């Protein structure tokens, strides 16, 4: 429905974020015209909402501790077969985390500010001050949409297209081709540079879409 409002035919769509943009070298920042590297500030009403959310942090931490305690209890009471399954899952998670670090996927991009991903990243918040993007996979490329300014609510109402990448410019990639459930999706540019997006949940709409596509080249 949101894609229809944007005038694009969506194959899949999902809200995504990026990590904190690292500080570019001074000459790169100067040549790019000193673009913003952080999302816009919240308006007073949004700040009030953020303050309210901050008050809920202790409750969230308590719920997290209770969840951890429940998981520990489940493991302690698990049957032999369940313990074996849990050990296999832990081993898979460790392998996933090791591969993420080995491939540099714990970074927001490949690190080359002169590559296409680096140049695109420099303009991320110039296109929209909002911290999220609706990433839409379309038949002939990728569309990114967001409110022009940061909003605390109603982002769908203010949304507009902020970037279009044709299929010859960039593609969406699951770096593990479905082997692991992660929140990582890459925008991989034609020069092989990449930008890492964080999806809302593991194996979300974009991951499911990519599983239906031919395997990405290494």
Image: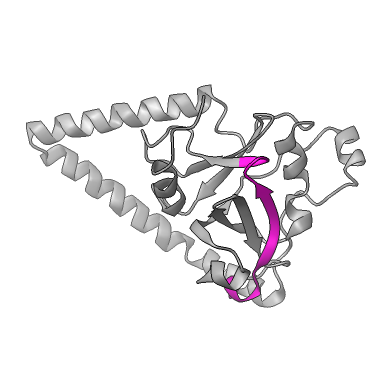
Identify the residue at horizontal 38%, vertical 25% (top origin): 95
Percent position (x, y) of residue 58?
Answer: 45, 60
Residue 156 appears in the rendering: yes
| Closest to the observer, 88 or 80 | 88
Relative placement, left or right, of 193 versus 97 is right
In the figure, is residue 8 to the left or right of 199?
Answer: right
Q: Which residues are magenta?
A: 153-170
Task: Name which quarter of the figure residue 72 lies in.
Answer: top left
Residue 73: x and y, percent?
18, 44
Judge left or right: residue 213 versus residue 197: left
Residue ID at (34%, 58%)? 63
90 is higher (above) or lower (below) than 186: above
Q: Is residue 75 magenta?
A: no
Q: Position of residue 43 (x, y in %)?
A: 71, 72
Q: Residue at x 43, y 49 (%)?
A: 209
Q: Residue at x 40, y 29 (%)?
A: 96
Q: Is residue 39 above or below residue 52?
A: above
Q: Quadrant of residue 90?
A: top left
> As rendered, which of 152 and 160 lies closer to the eye?
160
């Amino acid at each position: 429905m949101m894609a229809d409002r944007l005038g694009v035919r969506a194959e899949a769509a999902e809200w995504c974020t990026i990590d904190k943009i690292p500080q570019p070298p001074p000459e790169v920042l100067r040549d790019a015209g000193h673009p913003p590297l952080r999302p816009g500030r919240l308006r007073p009403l949004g700040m009030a909402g953020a303050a309210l959310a901050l008050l809920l942090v202790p409750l969230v931490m308590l719920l997290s501790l209770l969840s951890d305690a429940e998981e520990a209890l489940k493991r302690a009471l698990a049957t032999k077969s369940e313990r074996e399954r849990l050990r296999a899952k832990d081993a898979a998670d460790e392998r996933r985390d090791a591969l993420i670090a080995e491939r540099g996927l714990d970074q927001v991009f490949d690190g080359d500010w002169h590559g296409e991903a680096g140049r695109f990243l420099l303009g991320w918040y110039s296109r929209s001050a909002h911290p999220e993007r609706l990433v839409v996979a379309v038949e002939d490329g990728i569309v990114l949409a967001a409110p022009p300014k940061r909003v605390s609510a109603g982002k769908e109402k203010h949304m507009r297209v902020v970037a279009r990448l044709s299929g010859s410019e960039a593609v969406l990639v699951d770096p593990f081709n479905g082997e692991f459930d992660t929140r990582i999706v890459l925008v991989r540019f034609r020069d092989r540079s990449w930008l890492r997006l964080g999806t809302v949940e593991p194996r979300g709409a974009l991951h499911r879409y990519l599983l239906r596509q031919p395997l990405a080249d290494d």
